[in-house]
Amino acid sequence: MGLLERCQELFKTSNLYEVLGVKKEAAEADIRKGYYKVSMKVHPDRAPDDPQATEKFQILGKLYAVLSDKEQRAVYDEQGVVDEECDALSQDRCWEEYWRLLFPKITVQDILEFEKKYKGSDEEKQDLIQLYEQHKGDMNAITESAMCCTQEDEPRICSIIQAAIDGGEVKAFSAFTRETEKKKKARRKRADKERQEAEEMQKELGLGSQSDSLVMMLQQRQKSREQNFNSFLSDLESKYSQKGKSGKAKKAKK
């Protein structure tokens, strides 16, 4: 049975883009992110109750191998078929190894280094503007979705967004420009509670370093905002994957 048929059977669609939850016009980075998010849901270690998890994981690996290859993707886009004999679909490949080469495990130090480079960068600005438009100026949703964001970052985030509004880059949503003080206080109160709970957890475990503090913060955020936390890690891991390691993955298929 071919790749498209297996996708239909396992994911209820033979459209490779639909399996990953992306559009046909999606950029390579979005396809990579979609692959990561979907594969995480069916990873055998994370879905032990799914008897088809291993097969789904392998099929996703083959699917991504096709869409990440410019020639194979072009053929699929134009003809709606997949070359089952291509190297990308080699049957003897270890798809778990391929996946790990693409997405090396993120460590606390990786997060610290990424945060240092990310804050204040053009990439952060673009991400914040995108979130602003996506959530129509709702600062609750923006701050919960923004990467590496804490309560202390809010004034800086607001300044970035306001500058974009003043410069005509985005429209002014009333949810942002007319946000009530009551809503702002509620957000600060929630953030203070999360920070306090994280600090209490840190004291109980006798931790004190910056890395330990970050771990506590992440654990607390996972507890209170699990969906956004998982999204944060997904975005970070897909962003943090180095091109050099992607190169190794390509070499591995030969």
Image (cartoon, rainbow, N blue to C red):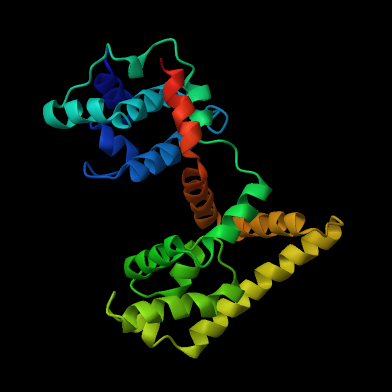
Q: Is residue 84 left or right of residue 187?
A: left
Quarter of the image for the N terminus: give it. top left
Above or below, 118 relative to 193: above
Above or below, 92 relative to 45: above
Picture coordinates of residue 42 (x, y %)? 47, 32
Picture coordinates of residue 254 (x, y %)? 41, 15
In percent of the image, x 56 and y 80: which residue is there? 186
Q: Is residue 192 left or right of residue 148?
A: right
In percent of the image, x 53 and y 23: which residue is there? 97
Q: For the view shown, which residue lies furthest in the right direction?
A: 206
Picture coordinates of residue 165 (x, y %)? 33, 80
Above or below, 199 relative to 73: below
Q: Is residue 200 left or right of residue 239?
A: right
In percent of the image, x 69 and y 69: which residue is there? 195
Answer yes or no: is residue 43 visible.
no
In percent of the image, x 62 and y 53: which residue is there? 113
Q: For the view shown, which residue lies furthest in the left direction?
A: 79
Of residues 61 and 127, the one drawn nearer to the viewer in this rendering = 127
Answer yes or no: is residue 218 visible.
yes
Picture coordinates of residue 184 (x, y %)? 52, 83
**Occupied quadrant, residue 169:** bottom left
Q: How many marks?
A: 0
Q: Is residue 85 left or right of residue 105?
A: left
